[in-house]
Image (spheres, grey):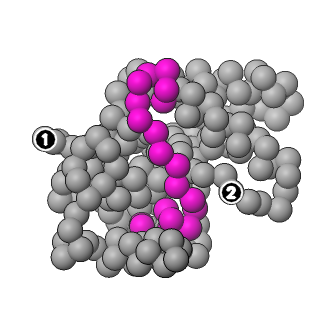
Amino acid sequence: MASALRVLGVDPGLTRCGVGIVDVRPDRTARLVHVGVLRTPPELAIERRLALIAEGLRATVAEHRPHVVAVERVFSQQNRHTVMGTAQASGIALLVAAENGLPAATHTPSEVKAAVTGYGSADKRQVQAMIARVLRLDTPPQPADAADALALALCHAWRGGAPGPAAPSAGTLTPAQRAWMDAERLSRR
């Protein structure tokens, strides 16, 4: 894919860490490069689980050589234990990006949903369906962590994530991108 931005999206988690890589051209067309889920057993010690996630992310970066890494931003959840594990896995993803000299960005779940579906409160099924449609897949990616990782990668690329194509002008945005930009503009007020 000529002049495409290759983005690694990471949906962090200790038990399931979604990874998705897409190539996105300046015209916003996208192609699936890789999708998967890094899994760690809950009975392992936390340091071993984090090491396994780091190992899997390093292997993914080495094999697919993304230009940039997009990670879900942990901001609030009810379950403190889940938040801690997610934040730790997020830190590992950012560390692996830094080790490889890759720029990294974080995006909230609502930003990602708005960028991909046009609606910041979209449910998992809506995100999976849109990812399948955008990437021209026969079936939605499973599990949801894999679809979320791809959605993170697309969100970042469509926002004009560096390096790569500049952000599209307002006249060339998809409806989902326009909705995302409107939501982002309102959140800055």
Mark 1, Cα crowd under 10 Å, few <14 / some 14-19 / many 20+, is: few
At a point 49% along the width and 21% down the height, the residue shown is: 99
Residue 115 image point, x, y percent = 42, 67
Does any portion of residue 29 appear in the rendered image?
A: no
Mark 2, Cα crowd under 10 Å, few <14 / some 14-19 / many 20+, is: few
Quote the CA–CA distance across marks 2 and 1: 36 Å
At a point 30% along the width and 55% down the height, the residue shown is: 160
> Which tag is nearer the camera, tag 2 or tag 1?
2
In the rendered image, the vertical position of residue 69 relative to residue 133, given as above or below: above
Q: Label 2's element?
A: loop
Amino acid type of disc 1? Ala
- Residue sitting at the far front: 189
At a point 71% along the width and 36% down the height, the residue shown is: 88
Q: Nearer the viewer, residue 189 or 145?
A: 189
Residue 118 left/right relative to 96 = left
Could you tell me which quadrant the N terminus lies in? top left
Task: Check disc 1 and report the residue beneath it.
Answer: 2
Residue 182 left/right relative to 44 = left
Task: Check disc 2 and report the residue beneath it.
Answer: 75
At a point 83% along the width and 62% down the height, the residue shown is: 78
Which of the 4 quarters of the picture holds residue 170? bottom left
Amino acid type of disc 2? Phe
Residue 18 image point, x, y percent = 56, 44
Residue 108 magenta: yes
Residue 160 magenta: no
The span shown in magenta is 97-116
- Residue sitting at the far left: 2
